[in-house]
Amino acid sequence: MLERFAPYVESSIRKSVSNPTKLYRFLSNPIVRHYVERYQLLKLKNSIKYCYNKSPFYHELFEKNNLHPNDIKSFEDMNKIPFTNPEDLQKPERFFTVPESKFTKIFSSSGTTGKPKAAYFTKNDLEKQISRNATGLHLVYDVEEGDRVRLTYEHGYETGDWGIRYLLENAIQRIGAMSVITGHRLPANKELDLLKTYNISILAGTTSYIYNLTCEMEPLYNLRSLHLKNIMIGSEPLPKAIRDKIEKTWNTKAYQGYGLTEIGTSIAGECKQQNGMHITESDFYVEITDPVTGERLKDGQIGEVTITTLDREGMPILRYKSHDLGLIMPEPCPCGLPFRRIKIKGRTDNMVPIGSGDNLFPSECDEAILNIPGVIDYKVVLDKKHNKDHITVIVEIKSRTGKIQKKIETAVMKIPAIRDGVCDSKTVEKPEIKLVKQDTIDKTSSKAKRIVDNRNLYD
């Protein structure tokens, strides 16, 4: 019965973009959660069988591990399937489940932590992603016909498109709103002219770009007077200090989304509660696993976000190690939506070990430094001298005052990994703070890399 009627219900939900209130009321019924889990397990089993029968990579992987799709009878049985690593996608053709001629689009990841990864999508895959994005934009973020959405995401990387820009543009068009895009990013004064000229109602972009834009435009104009409905942020973490600054300056809410180009751009997104991102569970199965042992972790425990696609036609992926650290929140959301929520806490490959084994997260530095009034941006540079870690914090400020240096020093020393290294293990020198004028730090890259490690620890 579920197998016959659930796909019809899912299709109806995707087509309910015109009536988000009715859809929200339906999804908020407590009984829906039970059927979400049953349907998700059904789609999971079907996806595994599909991969085994059609994907050269997964057929070989299952055979090598003496595994058959019928061995996966429950969510807990997923531990039997080995992980898929980002390096595996360097040869995407091994994952193809349709002839190459059926693919109509290639998206490229940013390559923040390595060689950009290419993800191939069929016409059906694109339609599902666009529909998914349109439903979420209309249901949660109030994007509606007549809105004008400024997309500041760049076009793409190397030879491929950046999926988030393409899919958002098409989803906005599906709703009947207008997307406003440019061939490249604009200086603050021209961006401001664009926002006013086209009466922009919603702004979308990466955390670092929206934050930098906010800081640069604030002295030029009262941004509150633009009356944005909201700001949609993706592709990077959104620390509280940055969110607070953006929301206060624009007098609107900033919502965070989560996705991976190689998996899907709308894996999860915040609701109005702004407390965790709801997972699109009809399209993705998300596990939290120990990044070292691979063990499945319980809700509430921090581990590596591991993702399985549930309805991808051309290049399905099972148990993909995202390198993102996160947790699934155990309690239901007060908003009433039945989908589990995820919080992203950092990156397994962005954890910078310092001192005697403590891990320094960029998000910790964001919270400590960017929360200080007058700070525009920063960069942390790590070096190794005389068997001690040396930390230089380069901070871009609006204007030099006698107190700002001291405030930065105090904030940096409160970061646990730095404090313990300096005061307890004595393996870290007290950080050096260098104040620089505005526009000194390079902001041309699409994703901010604020910690630069020159220690060659693994060479």
Image (cartoon, rainbow, N blue to C red):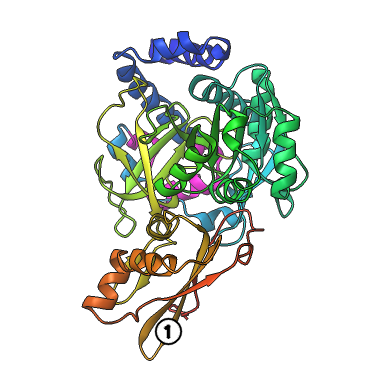
Q: Judge by depth and name the residue closer to the eye, 128 or 169.
A: 169
Residue 249 rendering spot, x and y as whole percentages: 52, 40
Q: Is residue 103 visible?
A: no
Circle 1 sits in a helix, a strand or a loop, which is it?
Answer: strand
The quadrant where residue 180 appears: top right
Residue 221 rendering spot, x and y as whole percentages: 64, 41
Residue located at (35% from left, 35% from top):
275
Residue 317 rendering spot, x and y as whole percentages: 50, 42
How crowded is the residue under tag 1: few (<14 C-alpha within 10 Å), some, or many (20+)?
Answer: some
Q: Residue furthest left?
A: 424
Q: Is residue 363 left or right of residue 434?
A: left
Residue located at (57% from left, 62% from top):
114
Provide the residue span drawn in magenta: 51-72
Q: Is residue 198 magenta?
A: no
Residue 177 rendering spot, x and y as whole percentages: 68, 21
Residue located at (63% from left, 59% from top):
443
Q: Judge by depth and name the residue closer to the eye, 300 or 8.
A: 300
Q: Quadrant of the N terminus?
A: top left
Q: Main secondary structure of the magenta part?
A: helix
Residue located at (61% from left, 39% from top):
164
Q: Would you place residue 145 above or below residue 157 in this image?
A: above
Q: Would you place residue 359 above or below residue 383 in this image?
A: above
Q: Is residue 216 visible?
A: yes
Q: Would you place residue 185 above or below residue 51 in this image?
A: below
Q: Is residue 33 left or right of residue 121?
A: left
The quadrant where residue 203 appears: top right
Residue carrying label 1 = 384
Q: Is residue 111 left or right of residue 99?
A: left
Q: Judge by depth and name the residue closer to the eye, 156 or 385.
A: 385
At label 1, which amino acid type do we have?
Answer: Lys
Q: Judge by depth and name the residue closer to the eye, 240 or 29.
A: 240
